[in-house]
Amino acid sequence: MTKKSMDKIMALAKRRGFVFQASEIYGGINGFWDYGPLGTLLKRNLREAWWQDVVLFPCRGALGPNGEPVRMVPLDTTIIQHPKVWEASGHVAGFSDPMVDCRESKARYRFDHLLVFAPASGDTQGKPYFAYLTDSPSEAKQKKKAEKAFGDVITIALSEVPKDAWARVLGPDAEKVGSLTEPRAFNLMFKTYVGATAGEDDVAYLRPETAQGIFVQFKNVLDTTRVKLPFGIAQTGKSFRNEVTPRNFTFRSREFEQMEIEFFCHESEAAEWYRFWRDTRMAWWQSLGLKGENLVLREHDREERAHYAKEGAGVSDVEFRFPFTDPGFGELEGIAHRTNFDLGQHQKFARTNLEFFDSDRGELLPNGSRKGEKYLPHVIEPSAGLDRGVLALLCEAYTEDPSRPSPELLRLHPRLAPVKGAVFPLVNKDGMPEISEKLHAELVRKFYRLGPIEHDVKQSIGKRYARMDEAGCPYCFTVDGETASAQTVTVRDRDTGAQERIGIDRVAEFLAQKLEQS
């Protein structure tokens, strides 16, 4: 399989208005991205697909391991929570990455992302170790220097460099050795202050994840709905992490959006629900076009497991092969059995009973009812990155076809395509624009809830097709010289380029069927 060019994908994303650098006219700000007109629509469509398949029609009607429909309720919690929320969750004390600074270049690097080229023989003979940041241009530059110094080289982690040789490490962007500082913890949360005259006593944080808002509202959801366990709470929203080295386009950003589920169940059922959600979430991404060898489901090794995952608790990732990770993969969604760690922490810190009374459990009483059981539920968390999802879809859909008027197109799933259809007059005369305008107005009325329908009369028909190919529009309808007499139009398929004629009165039905089938 031919490796796709991330540079070309990024260029198309900018040229067609999918993604822009934030504050670009001021030189941009690292780790922040804005979505243009088409990118906003694509992101909305992915969010809506998740919302429909998770909240409105959970798992598209599939039964859970208990043989019953999956129950899910929505929530929308604030970006700023009480500071004690993050103390209880462990983020204040432990949400940090080891970092090193370069005194010469003033650059900052994740300690665990720095690798080093060293001689294959293991003997540097007093020469420097050449450090580079993973997935960055410095790798090729440092390797060239290392091969000139040593000949054959191997790659080791910076942490494996002997302590007595630390002063001989050449930083990725430095010219002199010994410029890297010792690693130190760097908290990833954005700090802010609450109140017009706030001081250090009024410190708050932008949330690093949406999950904790769900946990702290768990009791209120139980008290105000008729839902009972097992059930899930779902929300989408912005999160913020002050990444040390944001990179790879929108993959690792400082502001990003999550799509998270916290599914509450009895401990005895947790393993079954974990497997259910692991497989369901993998199948969902596949249904949107991320198929084949670019998508994998990977179980975590024991040493990878988070602090909340006790022995035996399942943790896995849905991973996608991005061009910048090829031949490896990058995380798209994590599915974790979080046990009852979070509810237990908030119960302890808030001094509030968060246990659930389950009247369907416990010993059977003489009258046929159950005694009931009170317990702190376990949680299965499928947590997906919306921005990473959009990026994966763009990378998967990007296709080069030199035989076309435009050699680039986006084969986006019709459900996610930002533009659902386009109507063109073959030429801007002979009554064709009037017919196309009428058809366009009809389609807008019928499909505006799903997405926009384009109408374009300028330039050659080939260039208009090419623009729609790059936008990912699945179908184009062209009014031509035969339309007035035969009452037919030409419909063009984006993926194949094939064309067929259909009645103008069938266009709306044709598009509805195609979008519904997708």
Image (cartoon, rainbow, N blue to C red):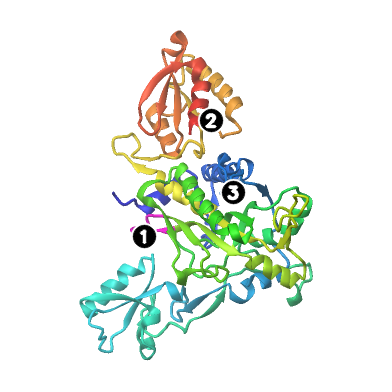
Q: Are marks 3 and 1 in contact (CB under 8 Å)?
A: no
Residue 369 screen position, x and y as percent? 75, 51
SS at circle 3: loop
> Which residue does the numbered mark 3 point to in the structure image?
66
Magenta region: 320-330
> Which residue does the numbered mark 2 point to in the structure image?
453
Q: Residue at x 47, y 73 (%)?
A: 110
Q: Residue at x 25, y 76 (%)?
A: 153
Q: Is label 3 or label 1 in front?
A: 3
Residues at marks 2 and 1, CA–CA distance in whole angstroms: 38 Å
SS at circle 2: strand
Sequence-wise, the earlier of marks 3 and 2 is: 3
Residue 203 in sight here: no
> Which residue does the numbered mark 1 point to in the structure image?
328
Above or below, 33 relative to 487 = below
Foreground residue among 390 and 233: 233
Q: Residue furthest left?
A: 151
Residue 127, which numbered label? none
Is 161 included in the stretch rendered in magenta?
no
- Disc 2 residue type (three-letter): Ile
Side of 4 relative to 261 (left or right): left
Foreground residue among 485 and 391: 391
Q: Residue furthest bottom?
A: 164
- Disc 3 residue type (three-letter): Asn
